[in-house]
Amino acid sequence: MKKFIPILAGVLLLFTLAACGKEGIDKVLSDNSLTVIQNVKTDLKDYKLAYVENKNDKTGVLEYYKDTNGKDISNIQLDSALKKEDSKVKVNLMNGLNGLIAMVEIKDTKLAKEATELVLMDSNKEVDEATVISLTNKSTNDGTTVAIIEIPSLDPTTASALKSVELRNDNHESIYQNGLKASKIKPQASSERAKKNGFFPAVNKYIADKEWKIVSSATQKKQVYTAILRDKNGGYHLVEFTYPDGKLAVKETSKK
């Protein structure tokens, strides 16, 4: 029986781009022969995501931001993580500054219209847990539908266990399935900001150390994560995680 973990993280696909650091990102695009098809709205003014295309017509996702020392940091994922190549769907995965970045590209009109959820399933043999992300703000241009999403609760360690992907419709029925290659999940760009951004790695370590399982969860804000967890004895715990001053704070409420 599958356990679904809905992530209330915004689907980030709009057409705005902050002016901050424009010269830096222009240089990144030029050096990598990339053209921006669509810019992505994010919560941070000095952090950018974009749907891009290279000179060989290969599409993907670009992450760009300024490090604490002012250095330009960029990461680009043009390769699909799907186990079986598909002309209808492409899913690119990259570990970003704020969690896993997923780019979903659909080139089938019917599938694009029906797909409302992206489902990422892990390799847990005991219980097949899944992360479900809404695709309500997907955008279509020239017959291609794209959504780019940040998933804060999937840090690099957690993302490495992903094994398959589904697209689902409004009735939560699977309308597309494929396997995932963990080797095609691009590593996180090295930066001082990334080193300090330890909220979800700390959350996932806390859960793993207790040997608890996630039943459901929600990212309410950038630094607030609430989850219902099941312990080894079958007891349930409502847990709120925060990260004040760079240290994990946990508030638990036990439920029978």
Image (cartoon, rainbow, N blue to C red):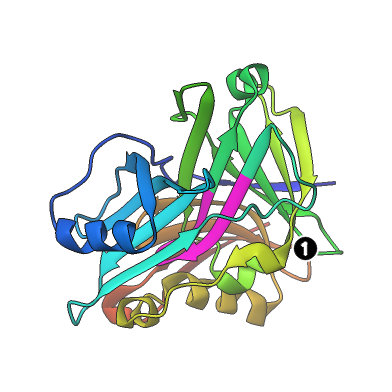
Q: Position of residue 135 (x, y in %)?
A: 52, 33
Residue on which the image places disc 1: 234
Identify the image quadrant of the C terminus.
bottom right
The answer to which of 80 and 31 lies nearer the viewer is 31
Give the magenta-colored segment's residue range.
91-102
Residue found at x 40% / y 63%: 98
For residue 240, which quarter of the picture?
A: bottom left
Examine the rendering and report whether any part of residue 157 can be seen. Answer: yes
Examine the rendering and report whether any part of residue 161 can be seen. Answer: no
The kind of secondary structure element at disc 1 is loop
The answer to which of 88 and 58 lies nearer the viewer is 58
Q: Position of residue 35 (x, y in %)?
A: 36, 46
Classify residue 69 as left or right of residue 128.
left
Q: Residue furthest left?
A: 19
Residue found at x 48% / y 57%: 226
The answer to which of 123 and 164 lies nearer the viewer is 164
Classify residue 173 as left or right of residue 247.
right
**Is 19 part of what is drawn in magenta?**
no
Q: Position of residue 36 (x, y in %)?
A: 35, 44
Residue found at x 35% / y 80%: 191
**Is 98 part of what is drawn in magenta?**
yes
81 versus 251 height, above or below: above
198 versus 1 height, above or below: below
